Structure formats: C-alpha cells, structure tokens
Image (cartoon, rainbow, N blue to C red):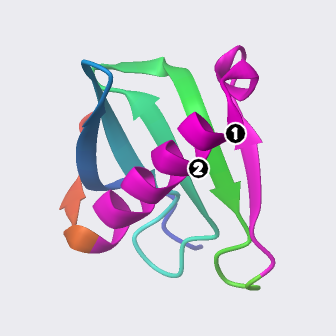
Amino acid sequence: MADTTEVQRGSFDKDGTRFDVCASSAMAPEAMRVYQAGDRSVIALVVSGLNSGELKASWGSGWGAYPEEWRDDFEERAYRAYVSRVRFCNG
C-alpha cells in the first residue's frame, strides 16, 4: 500500500499570515496542499496533477475571491516553499 502521510515541504508568509505547504505523500505526491499554519481545517489552495503534469489549482472557501494578482503571488510563494525543503507534517 502506498504511503499517504503528508509531508511538509515548507512555509511562507503572505499579508501577515503564515501558511504551511504539504505534499500529499512522501513518495510521488499527486498534490500539494496549502494550509493556514497551525490549522489543517483551513485549506487555502490545492494544486493537483503533480505527477501527470496537468496542474489544476483549486482554491479553498473564500480564497478564490482574491484578485488574480494576489492569487498569482500566493501560488508563486507556495511553489517556492514546496521546492525549498522537506520535513514531516505534525498531525
């Protein structure tokens, strides 16, 4: 059975709020998830299709209403955090 433990890949700050970026699993993750730090119930962004290359961004409740420029910057910060380092998520 495949390992489905999320792995924290990094974190970043945006507008005074800290966000954690996690891979959906340790081996060949299919998605990255962005949460408000310390609250896994608040998903800001999910980017799926990491293995297929057919990337699709899905915004959490309320997050997609931000202006496109804000969302583009958020996605860029999340990506940079995702590729920067790896450590296991707590929870």
Q: Which residue is mark 1?
A: 68
Start and end of the magenta stretch? 54-83
Point 47% across, 40% down: residue:
34
Nearest the eye: 33 or 88: 33
**Left or right of residue 43, residue 76 in this image:** left
Image marks 1 and 2: residues in contact by CB distance under 8 Å: yes
Q: Amino acid at mark 1?
A: Glu
The quadrant where residue 15 appears:
top left
Q: Which residue is mark 2?
A: 72
- Image spot of residue 14 (x, y percent): 33, 31
Q: Amino acid at mark 2?
A: Asp
Asked if one can make out residue 89 in the rendered structure from this viewpoint, the answer is: no
In the rendering, which numbered label is found on residue 4?
none
Q: Tag 1's secondary structure?
A: helix
- Image spot of residue 73 (x, y percent): 48, 47
In the picture shown, does residue 61 fall above or below 20? above
